[in-house]
Amino acid sequence: MYHDGMSASRQEGDLGAGRVNQKRRTRAAIVEAARELLDEGTPPTVSQAARRALVSRTTAYRYFPTQESLQLELSVNIDVDEIEELVNRPLGDESPTERTVTVMRQLNEHVVEEEVRYRASSRLYLDLWLSAVASGEDAPVVREGRRKRWITTTLGQGLDDVSAKDRDRLLAALTLLCGVEAITVLRDVAQLNAEDALDVADWAARTLIDATAATSRPSRSGPTKMAG
C-alpha cells in the first residue's frame, strides 16, 4: 500500500504536539496543586504537590528538581493573578489591540519591578532545558506558556479578517515582546532604562499588530476589527 509521506509527517507532528501539550498539562497540574497547598497554609514540597496532582514523584522532580525551583515558579505564578483577571474580563469599549497591549505592558511591568526574581526564573528554565536535553528528552517542556495564552485570548477576538497563517505568525511574534526575555534584551543589549524599555515594547507590539492589519485589509475596506 502506498503511504503519503506528507501525511505521515503530519501525523508525526501531531503526535509530537500531543506529547508537548500533555507535558504542559502535567506541569500546570503540579503548579496548581502546589498553589492549592499554599492556599491551605501548607508550604508545599515537590512530593506533596506530586501527590495532590496525581503524578509520580519522579515526574514531578523532572519539572521541579529542587524545592527552590518549585517555590520560584509559585512566586512567578502568584504574581500575575491580576493579569489573568484582566485577560478574562469582557472587553467593553476597549479594543482587542488595546487590551492586548495593556496585558503585555502589565507583564513587563511585573518583570521590571521584580527583575531579580524573574531573571532567576529565566536561569532555572535554561538549566531545566539543558538538563532535559542532556538526558535525551526530545521535547523538554520547562515553561507553562502563559503569555501565548493571554495574547491569543485577548487579541484573538479581533483577528476575524486575518488569515490563519498571519494570525499565528503575529501571535507568536508578540510573545517576543513581553516577559523576562524581552526586558533582558531591552535592558542589557539595547541598554534602555526601565521606562524606555516598556515604551519600546508597547510601540513594537502596536507596530506588528497594525502591520498585520494593513496587509490583511482589502484595498477598499475600512479598518479591520483587529485595529479597533
Image: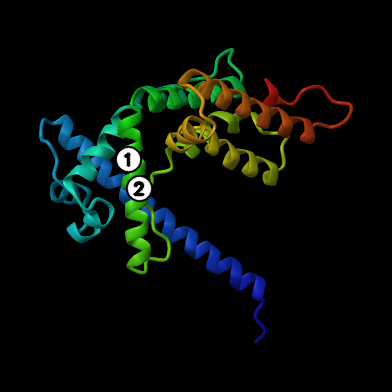
* Picture residue at 80% right of the left edge, 31% below the top: 217
Relative to 176, 23 lies left or right: left
The residue identified by callout 2 is 125
Classify mark 2: residues with Cα within 10 Å, few (<14), some (14-19) or many (20+). Answer: some
- Point out the image quarter for the C terminus: top right
Q: CA distance from mark 1 to mark 2?
A: 6 Å
Which structural element holds mark 2?
helix
Please identify the quarter of the rendering in which residue 43 is found.
Answer: top left
**132 versus 226 height, above or below:** below
Q: How is the image coloured?
A: rainbow
* Picture residue at 46% right of the left edge, 26% below the top: 87
Q: Is residue 200 visible?
A: yes
Q: Residue 78 versus residue 86: which sits nearer the camera?
A: 78
- Counting from the top left corner in percent of width and height, residue 138 is at 42, 66
Relative to 14, 63 lies left or right: left
* Picture residue at 31% right of the left edge, 27% below the top: 79
**88 versus 139 height, above or below:** above
- Counting from the top left corner in percent of width and height, residue 196 is at 53, 20
Please identify the quarter of the rendering in which residue 85 is found.
Answer: top left
In the rendered picture of this protein, how many numbered marks are placed on residues? 2
- Counting from the top left corner in percent of width and height, residue 92 is at 55, 14
Say the numbered circle drawn on residue 121.
1
